[in-house]
Amino acid sequence: MAELTALESLIEMGFPRGRAEKALALTGNQGIEAAMDWMLELVAQKQREREEREEREALERERQRRRQGQELSAARQRLQEDEMRRAAEERRREKAEELAARQRVREKIERDKAERAKKYGGSVGSQPPPVAPEPGPVPSSPSQEPPTKREYDQCRIQVRLPDGTSLTQTFRAREQLAAVRLYVELHRGEELGGGQDPVQLLSGFPRRAFSEADMERPLQELGLVPSAVLIVAKKCPS
């Protein structure tokens, strides 16, 4: 059997022909061992290069992950700051609207006071002077005296508020029910810190809800003389 050449021996060992030829050429055809050392060193070098490349890629991926994490954290922080800024602006807007609403209520109370003073010639809390009753005819004899109905010129109204407190005020019998409602609205605004919602007046017994038309009728005509108890309920806006 003929002796194998160095190239054939390397090919028989499983090395590719091209790599075996290159190894023999670069080692000066010094034999199989030199060629094998060169090829093994080449394999080891490529392995090191691959490991170094993988390590660099891993480091780059880690840097990219950290960079993305920092960007995400910064974006989350910006979002939180924007939300806090919007919440602060919303609180400032609501406070401004509340102050404006309170100012409108105060202005309404002042206008109502002025209108009531102009209409009735005095302040809301002032009591009207008593009106002397007109003298009636003198009966000729006790047996002929017809039954007379007593006329009242004043009316004492007690108003029960939703929070359990009450207001009491004396009005003229010929005064309109609107004067009582205005009195309630003004005193709710001044004493109870409310008055922003319109009110509905109800009679205690028999139960009756007074309409807007009733507001123009005298207390005497509504059967509230000489005294009555009214209940305040919130009026639903139309």
Image (cartoon, rainbow, N blue to C red):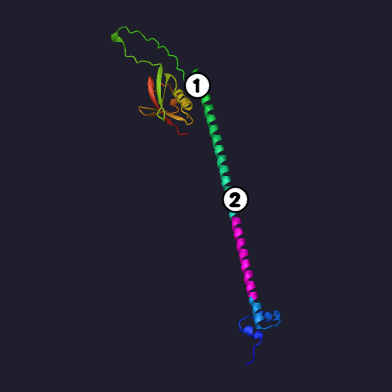
Q: Residue at x 58, y 48 (%)?
A: 77
- Please say if 189 is above or below 122: below
Q: Which residues are magenta?
A: 41-68
Which residue corresponds to the image point at 66% horizontal and 80% vertical from the top-left? 34
Residue 226 is drawn in which quadrant? Answer: top left
Q: Is residue 47 visible?
A: yes
Distance in Å between CA atoms under marks 1 and 2: 62 Å
Q: Nearer the viewer, residue 181 or 49?
A: 49
User: In what element is the residue under mark 2?
Assistant: helix
Task: Read off the residue under disc 1.
Answer: 116
Residue 71 location (% of width, % of height): 60, 53
In terms of secondary structure, where does tag 1 sit?
helix
Query: How many other residues sit within 10 Å of disc 2, few (<14), some (14-19) or many (≥20)?
Result: few
Q: Nearer the viewer, residue 76 or 205?
A: 76
Q: Is residue 35 above or below residue 162?
A: below
Q: Which residue is mark 2?
A: 74
Residue 170 among those drawn in magenta: no
Residue occupying the point 40% across, 23% down: 158
Which amino acid, by three-letter code, is at mark 2?
Ala
Looking at the image, which residue sits at the far left? 143
x and y, in percent, of residue 174 in the image: 43, 19
Residue 12 screen position, x and y as percent: 61, 84
